[in-house]
Image (cartoon, grey):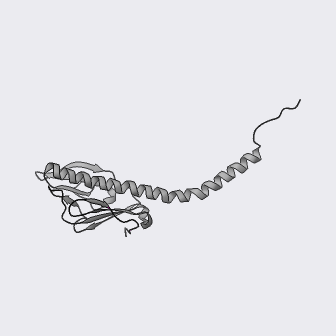
Amino acid sequence: MTHKHNGFTLVELMVTVAIAVLLLLIGVPALSSVYQQSRSDTNIKTIQEALTFARAQAVNYGREIIVCPYAASPCGTDWSKGLSVYTLNAGAKRVLREYQGFNSQDAIKVTGADAEAKISFGADGMVSSNAEFIYCPNGASSASRSAKLDASGRLSEGSNGLSCG
């Protein structure tokens, strides 16, 4: 009596694994751009959330609220290190919220009159001038996202594909 064995031979298994590896080698680089787009979207939303929070706090407290690059001293110079939202209380920095730093390979460019150093929301929720935050994952302009802040303190989505250089 002969028994029929069900299963795969070693050759069939090796061919299947080889095909799977080839498909992964072709597909993974394409996922890199999807990952960059996703990271860019997520991080520009974080920046928008920080600015929205700061504006709301300025109106709620009825005093100036400042958003600047994270640092131990009042403000840093590198926006990619994170964001700090604070107010000055009797001359001392009172931190309201801090946001974690972004990927060290990414670039953030901030344009506007005083925007490179800090964004200050007045008690009425307005800022002194327009500003734009441009986020470039891995410095790639093709996946960049931006957020625009107008003088009234309102946020809007900016253009995509802008240069951080």
Residue 159 counted in the magenta span: yes
Evaluate whether residue 82 shows in this view. Answer: no
Give above or below for 31 relative to 140.
above
Q: Where's the N terminus, which quadrant?
A: top right
Residue, far top: 1
Magenta stretch encompasses residue 81? no
Q: In this view, does 94 lie to the left or right of 83?
A: left
Quarter of the figure with residue 156: bottom left
Magenta segment's dominant SS is loop
For the residue pair 112 and 156, the one nearer the viewer reads as: 156
Residue at screen point 16% across, 52% down: 59
The x, y position of residue 53, in whole percent, is 25, 51
Q: Name the residue at the left extreme.
A: 90
Q: How many marks?
A: 0
Residue 121 in view in this figure? yes
In this rendering, would 132 be left or right of 4?
Answer: left
How far across and how far down the image is residue 29, in percent?
55, 59
Q: In this view, does 26 lie to the left or right of 45?
A: right
The residue at the far right in this view is 1
Residue at coordinates 19% horizontally, 59% vertically from top-left? Answer: 120
Q: Is residue 115 or residue 6 the one in the foreground?
A: 6
- The quadrant of the image that shows the C terminus is bottom left
Is residue 131 found left or right of 165 in the rendered image? left
Q: In this view, does 36 lie above or below 5?
A: below
| Span highlighted in magenta in the image | 157-162
Q: Which residue is found at the position 22% from the left and 53% from the top?
A: 54
Q: Position of residue 78 (x, y in %)?
A: 30, 61
Across and down, in percent, residue 7 comes to: 75, 39
